């Protein structure tokens, strides 16, 4: 037993699998979002695990606040990185894409979020310089930047 005011250090070893080594290398501790901060993230982790994804880490997302959605997390997996917006119960969010064809933002993409909450409809728009892919699964809105990963996620969600 340690003396009062002293720390006890408990060391534990886990096998260092290739997936665990990559997770350590790619996920800085300052970015990791504890599951307790966002309980819905655990459900996403389990869903992904059941469908063959290795979740390397769950992080804070710079997308937090988009369309006034506060519960947002980033996921780094062995098959790609994406963001998940957790849509509050009883609300709906639809996303439409428009390619900007004139002006200084010509060639950019404009995404309009139509959020319905308590019978009120709100519109929010963001403009970005590359395509984004939004995949809806129950109360999750997944954002990915790779068309192939988006297609895989759509098929995965439809199969569950």
Image (cartoon, rainbow, N blue to C red):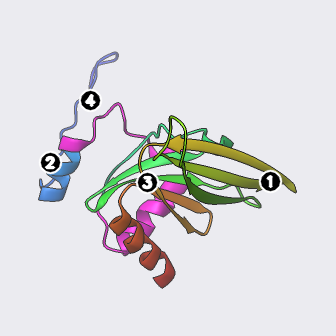
| Residue that numbered label 2 is attached to | 13
| Label 2 element class | loop
Can you identify the residue that label 1 sits on?
A: 117
Q: In percent of the image, x 59 and y 54: which residue is there? A: 86
Residue 103 visible? The answer is: yes
Q: In this view, does 25 lie to the left or right of 114?
A: left
Q: Do the residues labelled 1 and 2 touch (CB within 8 Å)?
A: no
Label 1: state its secondary structure. strand
Q: Residue furthest front?
A: 102
Task: Give SS at disc 4.
Answer: loop
For label 3, the residue is 131
Question: Left of 155 or right of it: where is 10?
Answer: left
Q: Give the range drawn in magenta.
A: 25-54
- The 10 Å Cα crowd at callout 3, few under 14, some 14 to 19, many 20 or more, is some
The answer to whether the residues at label 3 and label 2 have Cβ atoms under 8 Å apart is no
Q: Residue 1 carries which label?
A: 4
Closest to the camera, between mark 4 and mark 2, is 2
Disc nearer the start of the sequence (4/2):
4
Q: Residues within 10 Å of mark 4 (few under 14, many from 20)?
A: few
Distance (Cα) linking label 3 and label 2: 42 Å
Disc 4 vs disc 1: which is toward the camera?
A: 1
Q: Does the magenta stretch include residue 77?
A: no
| Residue placed most toward the observer, 31 or 13 | 31
Considering only order in the chain, which callout, 3 or 1, is on the residue closer to the N terminus?
1
The x, y position of residue 128, in whole percent, is 48, 43
Q: What element carries label 3?
A: loop
Q: Which residue is drawn at 44% across and 69% down?
A: 47
Residue 75 lies left or right of residue 67; in this view the side is left
Work out whether mark 1 precedes mark 2 in sequence or the reverse, and give the earlier one.
2
């Amino acid at each position: 037993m340690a003396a009062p005011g002293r720390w006890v250090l408990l060391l534990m070893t886990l096998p260092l699998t290739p997936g665990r080594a990559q997770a350590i290398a790619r996920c800085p501790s300052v970015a990791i979002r504890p599951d307790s901060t966002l309980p819905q993230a655990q459900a996403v982790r389990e869903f992904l695990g059941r469908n063959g994804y290795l979740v390397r880490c769950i992080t804070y997302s710079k997308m937090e606040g988009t369309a006034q959605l506060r519960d947002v997390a980033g996921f780094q997996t062995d098959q790609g990185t994406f963001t998940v917006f957790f849509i509050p119960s009883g609300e709906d969010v639809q996303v439409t894409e428009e390619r900007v064809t004139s002006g200084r933002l010509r060639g950019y993409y404009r995404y309009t979020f139509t959020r319905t909450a308590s019978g009120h409809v709100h519109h929010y728009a963001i403009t970005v310089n590359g395509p984004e892919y939004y995949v809806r699964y129950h109360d999750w809105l997944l954002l990915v930047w790779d068309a192939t990963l988006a297609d895989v996620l759509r098929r995965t969600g439809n199969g569950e």
